[in-house]
Image: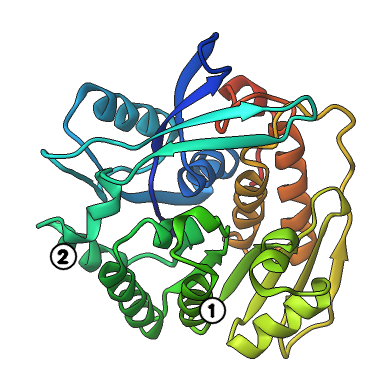
Amino acid sequence: MKRIALIGECMIELNGAPFGAMTQTFGGDSLNTAVYLARVAGEKVAIDYVSALGCDAISQGMLERWQQEGVGTNLVLRDETRQPGLYLIQLDEQGERTFLYWRNQSAARYMMQHADFGKIEASLVDVDMVYLSGISIAILPAQDRSKLITLLAALRAKGVEVAFDSNYRPALWRDADEARECYREIFAITDLALVTNDDEANLWGDSDEQATLNRLQAAGVKKAVVKMGAKGNLYQEFGAGELEAIATTPVEVVIDTTSAGDSFNAGFLAGYLQDKDAQQCSRQGHQLAGIVIQHKGAIIPTHATEAVRFV
């Protein structure tokens, strides 16, 4: 059994219209991937989440829900002085979403300054893969970003694979130059990059997906997935295989695109960590994402994914 540790932040989610009806749950890109991976990989993959929560009732409720989903929580730190962040999702008629965030003092933002983070570092040596996103690193104070990149490089030197979803969110960075500088350092130690064509074009000005692949190869990435929404994805293992294009079946009625990329990553990683080929991994990602975008919220009801198992 392979073991993966996913690093990031989970927040309280409010979904609905301001001053109108809302539902409250939780979500966060790397946590979304962890939950969906646990659902579809079953006992074939051991999943740990690396983060920090408060000691309040909502934090405790989150922790219990993650455990019910099959996500390991032994690497989740508890902060007595801070609580989870909060975000509000607003949807338009096409199912596209906009977000408002309240996260500057969240417990996860300061996880690397926690007195017990050294125990997390020691545990990560024993995993097969560490996964993080651009959001995972953007929320950290600048000095902690450098510490995390140094930690990832040390883990990689010991045989731990690094998977990175760039998931660029401009509001989390001082400016684009800061984001690009940080991403260059991460890509240099990335074994598997899972990027989205729109994000890469916005940050780097890539003219097309091939330009993205060329840049990732030059940056030091070993394997790359470029997600293209309804057009499917590209996959290439640099220096060891031809470019592969994997189509998807378009979804006729899209309710909410929240977690589309996160759930694709989960389906892909469920295959990757079981040594399936890129075609199988990609098809799994598309199948799972196709289900998720037909429901509201970052993490859809368990029954909606019960029929999907990638083992």
**Which residue is pictured at 31% across the width and 46% down the height?**
104
Estimate the x, y position of residue 287 in percent, counting from the top left: 77, 42
Disc 1 residue type?
Phe
Estimate the x, y position of residue 96 in percent, counting from the top left: 72, 35
| Nearer to us in this view, 255 or 42 | 255
Estimate the x, y position of residue 233 in percent, counting from the top left: 80, 60
Describe residue 84's horizontal placement relative to residue 78 as left or right.
Answer: right
Estimate the x, y position of residue 144 in percent, counting from the top left: 27, 68
Label 1 SS: helix
Label 2 SS: helix
Residue ID for mark 2: 118
Classify 10 Å Cα crowding around label 2: few (below 14), some (14-19), many (20 and above): few
Indicate the quadrant where residue 136 lies: bottom left
Disc 2 residue type?
Gly
Indicate the quadrant where residue 176 lies: bottom right
Residue ID for mark 1: 187
Describe residue 118's horizontal placement relative to residue 86 as left or right.
Answer: left
Measured Cα–Cα span from mark 1 to mark 2: 24 Å
